[in-house]
Amino acid sequence: MNISIVKIGGNVIDNPEKLEDFLLLFARLEGKKILVHGGGVMASKIGESMGIQANMVDGRRITDEPTLDIVTMVYAGLINKKIVAKLQRLEQNAMGFTGADGNLIRSAKRPVAKIDYGFVGDVKEIDTELLEGIISQGIIPVFSPITHDRKGNLLNTNADTIASELATSLAHKHTVKLYFCFNKAGVLIDENNEDSLVPKINEDIYDELKRDNVIHSGMIPKLDNAFSALQRGVSNVWIGKAENLILASKGMKSGTNIERHRYDLY
Amino acid sequence: MNISIVKIGGNVIDNPEKLEDFLLLFARLEGKKILVHGGGVMASKIGESMGIQANMVDGRRITDEPTLDIVTMVYAGLINKKIVAKLQRLEQNAMGFTGADGNLIRSAKRPVAKIDYGFVGDVKEIDTELLEGIISQGIIPVFSPITHDRKGNLLNTNADTIASELATSLAHKHTVKLYFCFNKAGVLIDENNEDSLVPKINEDIYDELKRDNVIHSGMIPKLDNAFSALQRGVSNVWIGKAENLILASKGMKSGTNIERHRYDLY
């Protein structure tokens, strides 16, 4: 099978109009597909309305027990089911999942090192066969970034990582393309100038741009996930704006393509 | 297939110890099975902590837009995924659903009559084939009481009704037993005395007990659902305490069996 895995982040989810526009594009995407969503901003807002402040360290959420309840409610409940209902209206037979459902994604609680991230899970195992069966029936899985440890605990897991791990697990038998949609046009040399878009990036360039501090903070785990997926058999990885998803799927110029081989930057 | 459909209500869900005990029993239930859960009290509590009061008319929740968001979060997110994770620990391959997922349960927004119930859905259609496929793979569906209209809207739907409708849809081809677990021992002549349990009830007795106001308020829709399921092909309907589920499944004396045929009450 040819399978497209699309990840959308908070900037699309938090804006109802952007979400509608994105879902129309996603519905037009041809072939088998999976959607993975995040949703951080909305979780923080709802937590605050309940008197629970988001606890962030180095841009990462610390998931204590009340926070785990909030992200479970918001990601797996509110956001996931709204997306599923909207896709159903577009005659897309979407079905929402966490990693706990059908034991699709088992993770392990991250060991406490310098920082105790709390109830955060690192992906350990994916039931690829069950997932293939679901996709081959014409169902479109919609994953929220919640997994479980199979010991009864839900765990908060980075949505980029989930997208990358699902892509990798399916790449053993299928041709998989991975699309990370976010709020920028792609990898930018100057983050305030879309004309500075890097249309293609490989690991050599990535290392260089990290060294020069052009690529930093939240972009690093995103690109690490992208390269990790490529190294483990995913055919194509793309990063760019949600509105360019269809262009990207047709191989037309937009966003940043992440590639394994060396070439010149300009 | 022989399929058991078990409905649990708020008194089990709101109490972590009772929920653990119930899930152990549910795990022991033999054969194919489906769990349907409610969760009203927790939704009200979380709504209140966000400054949104539950709006009840005649014991029924009015589902305005903020309330729909809360029940979606709490039912489909928090409660559903916690139950799924706990069943997974018990090596039960549970998978959580709303009616929107895979378009499993399509409903229609209840027309406004004397009361405007808001975003409340009456069940219209079940994708029995998809549900059979899921069950026959050894997966245990766990339904939260949220459905959708296939026009992009989620709708709040009574959990007893969902259990009864799922049972009916499967009864065309399968032998289906329906268990309503609630906070009483069954149908009681004196609601404060468990010795006054009615071990069997049919429609004639039901009419009589309603006329005498022995059966009233919340018990009426519950029994209406039960009789409706029996009339539409469900083999057995039982109502009683969650802790008696295994006794009931083995045909041992406990709770109230709902039957179609006439017999003497004593």
Image: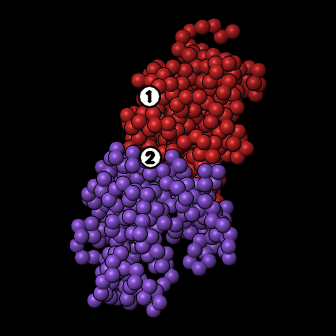
Chain colours: A red, B purple
| Picture coordinates of residue B52, whole percent (x, y) | 65, 67
**The C terminus of chain B: image quadrant:** bottom left
Camera-near label (1 vs 2) is 2
| Picture coordinates of residue A207, whole percent (x, y) | 57, 17
Q: Which residue was labeled with disc 2?
A: B130
Q: Is residue A226 left or right of residue B25?
A: right
Residue at 24%, 76% (x, y): give it: B253
Q: Secondary structure at mark 2?
A: helix
- Between B236 and B63, the one nearer to me in the picture: B236
- Relative to residue B22, is residue B183 depicted above or below? below
The span from disc 1 to disc 2 (Cα, nearest Å) is 23 Å
Which label sits on residue A160?
A: none
What chain does badge 2 belong to?
Answer: B
- Amino acid type shown at disc 2: Leu
- Between A229 and B198, the one nearer to me in the picture: B198
Q: Residues within 10 Å of mark 2 (few under 14, many from 20)?
A: some
- Relative to residue B239, is residue A69 depicted above or below? above
Residue at 57%, 63% (x, y): give it: B122
Q: Is residue B250 left or right of residue A195?
A: left
Q: Secondary structure at mark 1?
A: helix
Q: Are marks 1 and 2 in contact (CB under 8 Å)?
A: no
Residue at 56%, 13% (x, y): give it: A204
Q: Is residue A157 visible?
A: yes
| Picture coordinates of residue B162, whole percent (x, y) | 48, 62
| Picture coordinates of residue B42, whole percent (x, y) | 51, 67
Q: Are marks 1 and 2 on the same chain?
A: no
Residue at 70%, 46% (x, y): give it: A16
Q: Which residue was labeled with disc 1?
A: A170
Across the whole image, how many numbered discs are drawn on residues?
2
- Relative to residue A116, is residue B228 depicted above or below? below
- Amino acid type shown at disc 1: Leu
